[in-house]
Amino acid sequence: MSGQRNANEGTEALYAAMLRQYEVEQFLFYEADLLDSRRYDDWLTLLADDIHYWMPLRRTTTAREVDREFTRPGGMALFDNDKEILTMRVQRLSVGRAWAEDPPSRTRRLITNIRVLADADGELQVACNFKLYRTRLNSEEDSWIGRREDTLRRQGDSFVLARRHIFLEQTVILSQNLSNLF
Amino acid sequence: MSEQLITTDRQVDVSQCFNPQTGTLQRHIFTDEAIYQQELERIFARGWNFMCHESQIPAAGDFFMNWIGEDEVIVVRDREGKINVLLNSCPHRGNTVCRAEIGNTRSFFCSYHGWNFDLDGRLVGMPGEKEFYRDEIDKSVWGLSPAAKVESYRGFVFATLDPSAPALADYLGWVGRLGIDFLASKGELEFLDGVVKNRIQCNWKLAVDNLYDWYHVKVSHGTALKLGLVSDAAMAPMDQMVLLGELGHGIGGPGISEEKFQDSMRRLQAGEPASVWYDRNVADRMTGNMIEELGPVGKRSFGHPNIFPNLWVALTNQLCLRIPRGPFETELWWFTFQVNDEPEERRKFNLFMANHVFGPAGILEQDDGENWSHSTRGAKGAFGKKLPLNFAMGKGSDRMEADASGQSRIETVVNEHGQRWTYQAWQEWMQADSWETLLANHSQPPQGDC
């Protein structure tokens, strides 16, 4: 009988993990859709007040020195933002003269390979891969692929984003700017 | 083999491209492939190019990759502590011998056939030296080609491929040196790990002339103003100062009168909080020995220096290189420094500005790229490229005043003196077939009405 009980417990744990995976995926898909739909003010409401939004620099190193590939927190970064700066980035788009986004670029985000790495004290550590595709004006095209490490904090029956660390697969940024959110 | 590096068999006549009398510029200088090739030889190979700061490569074997035009070079500290600049190209087949952009190494090993080079570029060995080369290769002449000259000014390392280039300090002249002093006189500098790099589809000269441009700020970067990131007065102040140096160096941007400088110092020394846009600049200059080092005029300039051809010394403890990648593409490289013993508050502010203002995601800089790429595009069409551009702002309306200290300057409003000076110098560099000709024929900065 105990073996049966263990099997049931195992199945229940699997169901719980699947349910959690579904919740996490739906949150990340919704969040991406807000950005693709240019609903930036709604996007801001998903951010925790203490969010750290960070994209380090990446460098080509030898295999032996690959631990130097990314810059470290507190050093140079492409994004190293708190909520105030992220709010400013969003406000920028509506005050006029934000030329990089006026006319607005067209973006589509693909979020994939989502894995919950840890779940403790009401916070989930979630890794995913992304592609951000952008076209602009008539013929300009950019895309960025990378990995994200997010912290989703449980709030009510959903989440808020408490940390987003973004690791791009580029060293020299091959676009004229990074005027979009990842 | 450095005497072979400077060959000038191509000769495009650009003497009519910029007209200093009218302040007009022909657009095809941004798109013409032959002009671009001549720039690589007559400007980048000939001039002194910024390589790195000494603190970037403190230990033996530390290296940093950079470019002189389209020649990739290894900037490496050897075991004697000397910094070498070596062409990243194996003399056997031309392959690169270093593929990382930063790192530390004992030697440079070619991945094609295994030729191995010491940190000073010397060829130390290769597979089959005895069996295949029968001990008949003279290793002393087949090393990595070094730059003709490598010199530092206050920790900033420069290199030139032309053996007849003047010494670095003479090349920089007082304006170029002052530009670097804006940063170097703040104290001991430490490089902050990570050079921010991105590509813009523009001609490199348009990125360079923009650094003197205090006309675009409120329009291009209007959002920073509207968000309160920068005040209206600080963004494009009416008080402007221009300093022009031989060979194309210059400093242009905000600058205040001696009276305003004294008044600001008096208020700050009395402990009053900063209330006028330039108070922060003055407070910056009151640290250490900066006022004496920068001189009676230099201390009052808060403008943007350009070390000709392509090094901008920014006010945020940063340098920005504009590296050509063909006529239609430029790479921007941001180097950031911390001043040791700087108050924590100012250090945080500078890092904040470095990470949020400039760079591809910078709240100001993200709006620049499209302006420059579309200005380049505007020089491509058969009709458009024949039309001149207007660089005439302030021409003939200002005065270059000499100071007893020797620091001449124009004190005026927003203007295009710096841009005109840059294109005039560019034309002279492009017309000259050698350093000898350039030194004999280049313009002296204006005196009096200009």
Image (cartoon, coloured by chain):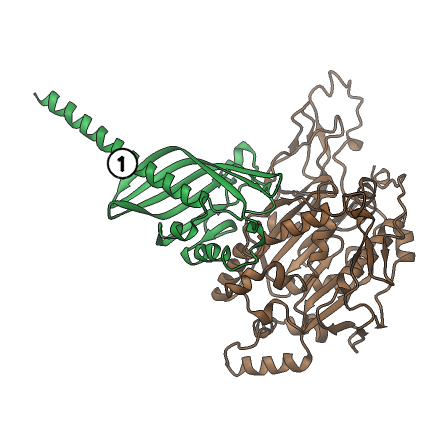
Chain colours: A green, B brown
In the displayed structure, would residue B144 be above or below residue B419?
A: above
- Is residue B203 something that shows in the picture? no
- Is residue A135 something that shows in the picture? yes
Which class describes the residues within 10 Å of circle 1: few (<14), some (14-19), or many (20+)? some
Q: Quadrant of residue B298?
A: bottom right
* Quadrant into which the C terminus of chain B falls: bottom right
- In the image, residue B426 lies at what x, y percent? 82, 53
Tag 1 residue = A20
Asked if residue A178 lies left or right of residue B14, the reply is left
- In the image, residue B330 lies at what x, y percent? 68, 45
* Quadrant into which the N terminus of chain B falls: top right
Closer-to-camera residue (B275/B29): B29
- In the image, residue B140 lies at what x, y percent? 78, 32
Asked if residue B214 lies left or right of residue A16, the reply is right
Q: Which residue lies at the image location 68% right of the left edge and 80% below the top edge?
A: B258
Element assignment for label 1:
helix
Amino acid, disc 1: Arg
Q: Which residue lies at the image location 86% right of the left edge and 64% below the top edge?
A: B444
Report the residue that reaches farthest toward the left.
A1
Q: Quadrant of residue B292?
A: bottom right
- In the image, residue B425 lies at what x, y percent? 83, 56
Closer-to-camera residue (A67/B203): B203
Q: Label 1 lies in what chain?
A: A
Asked if residue B387 lies left or right of residue B269, the reply is right
Q: Which residue lies at the image location 27% right of the left edge and 40% below the top edge?
A: A119
Report the residue that reaches farthest toward the top.
B131
